[in-house]
Image: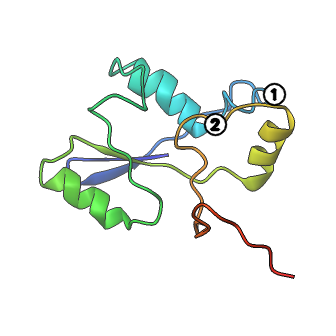
């Protein structure tokens, strides 16, 4: 994952503690446990007003702008979760952490889906 703070991007990496723990080894899980919860005391990533989520379609310069103007203290850019990992977690009846399954393009189906034959 990458952190943006005071005009500089930092790349953060770490060894995978337990490769068999698919959910626990995700970057987003480590971010939640070690940074948000462990360092910042944020235990509810869905409802904490100190967090703002931006979808993956926005350019990184928008994150930089928000930090550089003082609106946010720092930004985190996450690498996408490989499709194989998402499928393996789903096959094991696991639940992905919040905001870890962003994908583009979004389906424009609304309330009704029509099959095309």
Q: Earlier in the sequence, mark 1 or mark 2?
A: 1
Report the coloring of the rendering. rainbow
Looking at the rendering, which quadrant does residue 117 occupy? Answer: bottom right
Q: Horizontal and vertical percent for residue 33? A: 50, 22
How much space separates mark 1 and mark 2, taking CA atoms?
Answer: 11 Å
Quarter residue 115 falls in:
bottom right
Residue carrying label 1:
20
Which secondary structure, mark 1? loop
Q: Residue at x 36, y 22 (%)?
A: 42
For the point 57% across and 38% down, the residue is 27
**Is 91 placed above or below 78 here?**
above
Residue drawn 86% across the image and 39% down it: 91
Q: How far across and how far down the image is residue 84, in percent?
A: 80, 51
Residue count near mark 2 (Cα–Cα under 10 Å), binned few <14, some 14–19, many ≥20: some
In the shown orientation, is residue 39 left or right of residue 7? right
| 112 to 5, vertically: above or below | below
- Determine whether 36 is above or below 75 in the image: above
In this picture, residue 79 sits left or right of residue 84: left
SS for callout 2: loop
Q: Is residue 55 left or right of residue 67?
A: right
Q: Position of residue 113 (x, y in %)?
A: 70, 67
Who is closer to the viewer here, 16 or 49?
Answer: 49
Question: What percent of the width, then of the height, locates residue 75?
Answer: 32, 46
* Label 1: how many Cα within 10 Å (few below 14, some 14–19, many 20+): few
Q: Which of 88 and 61 lies nearest the eye of the viewer?
A: 88
Front residue (pair 59, 12): 59
> In this figure, which residue is indicated by the disc labeled 2?
26
């Amino acid at each position: 994952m990458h952190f943006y703070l005071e005009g500089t991007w930092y790349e953060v990496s770490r060894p995978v503690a337990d490769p068999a723990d698919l959910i626990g080894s995700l970057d987003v899980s480590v971010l939640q446990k070690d940074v948000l919860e462990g360092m910042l005391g944020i235990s509810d990533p869905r409802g904490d007003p100190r967090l703002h989520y931006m979808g993956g379609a926005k350019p990184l310069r928008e994150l930089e702008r928000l930090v550089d103007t003082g609106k946010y203290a720092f930004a985190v850019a996450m690498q996408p979760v490989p499709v194989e990992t998402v499928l393996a977690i789903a096959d094991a009846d696991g639940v992905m952490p919040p905001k870890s399954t962003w994908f583009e393009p979004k389906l424009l189906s609304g309330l009704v889906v029509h099959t095309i034959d």
